[in-house]
Image: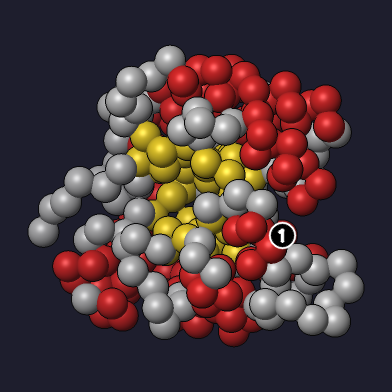
Amino acid sequence: MTTTRRTMIAGNWKMNGLKSDGKKLASALARRMKKLKKPNFEMVICPPYPLLGLASEAIKASGVKLGAQDCHSATSGAHTGDVSAELLKNIGCKTAIVGHSERRTDHGESDALVKAKAEAAIGAGMSVIVCIGETLRQRESGRAMSVNRKQLQGSLPDSATARNTVIAYEPVWAIGTGKVATPEQAQEVHAVIRRELAKMIGEKEADKVRILYGGSMKPGNAKELLSLPDVDGGLIGGAALNADDFWAIAASVD
């Protein structure tokens, strides 16, 4: 079964940038996006929380979409320091990243918590980017496929559809290290993810779900990775902090 999946180029700024940096970066991308009549990709930027309002204004009416790097599983309440999906939606976010490996590692987030956050984002009227991926030790011990299947099974929201859910495969060993999965490695895992999705939400729906690659994608390797049959875009870290590099990745989309 084949389908046309619109490529997503998503930038995760992580904990980087001050007001001037965020405005400059968002504005540069917005100007370029406005010049395209019919872009063949969807562009999303995910700044740190304090820069979301500023970025929202900078990309207004440009076609660039705003995303958050995380959200809480509750709609409101006594959760000091956390931000609800309802609030993120209210200030202009269209999507939220959940389950990034840095959240799983730094904050001990479980699959169950990731799933709850994903459900909260969807419940607020947003879409969600659910991240999964194996460590170097897990890959070297031959457990890469089983780890990704297990994380997907535990993290995918019950309400997941191709309209509200994107999966991002990020080999943890390739995030911020400069190491990149070979095209063969990336395609193998993406294909496994799609087959697992077919078991969970049906083959027809799974064929429409976008699966992003999220491990050190940059201008020099983007075209090759984006040409793979089951790679439907990228969740970009370091290269997303440079407008020229991030745009070059988007320009690699056929």
- Is residue 63 shown above or below 47? above
Comparing 249 with 76, the one in front is 76
Query: How many badges with numbers are in the image?
Result: 1
Q: Quadrant of the N terminus?
A: bottom left
Q: Quadrant of residue 200?
A: bottom left
- Is residue 50 shown above or below 163? above
Q: Is residue 5 left or right of residue 178?
A: left
Q: Residue at x 52, y 41 (%)?
A: 65
Instruction: Give the crowd class for mark 1: few <14, some 14-19, many >=20 residues within 10 Å.
Output: few
Comparing 195 with 185, the one in front is 195
Q: Which residue in the structure is indicated by mark 1?
A: 102
Comparing 117 with 181, the one in front is 117
Q: Position of residue 87 (x, y in %)?
A: 69, 63
- Is residue 116 shown above or below 168? below
Q: Is residue 127 left or right of residue 101?
A: left
Q: Position of residue 127 (x, y in %)?
A: 47, 61
Question: The disc labelled 1 sits on which kind of residue?
Answer: Glu
Q: Residue at x 53, y 52 (%)?
A: 94
Look at the image and tell me whether residue 39 can be seen: yes
Local SS, label 1: helix
Q: Is residue 181 left or right of residue 4?
A: right
Q: Residue at x 64, y 66 (%)?
A: 85
Q: Residue at x 53, y 55 (%)?
A: 95
Q: Quadrant of residue 134?
A: bottom right
Q: Is residue 215 left or right of residue 70?
A: left
Q: Position of residue 105 (x, y in %)?
A: 74, 67
Look at the image and tell me whether residue 184 can be seen: no
Q: Position of residue 216 (x, y in %)?
A: 58, 39
> Which coloring applies here?
secondary structure
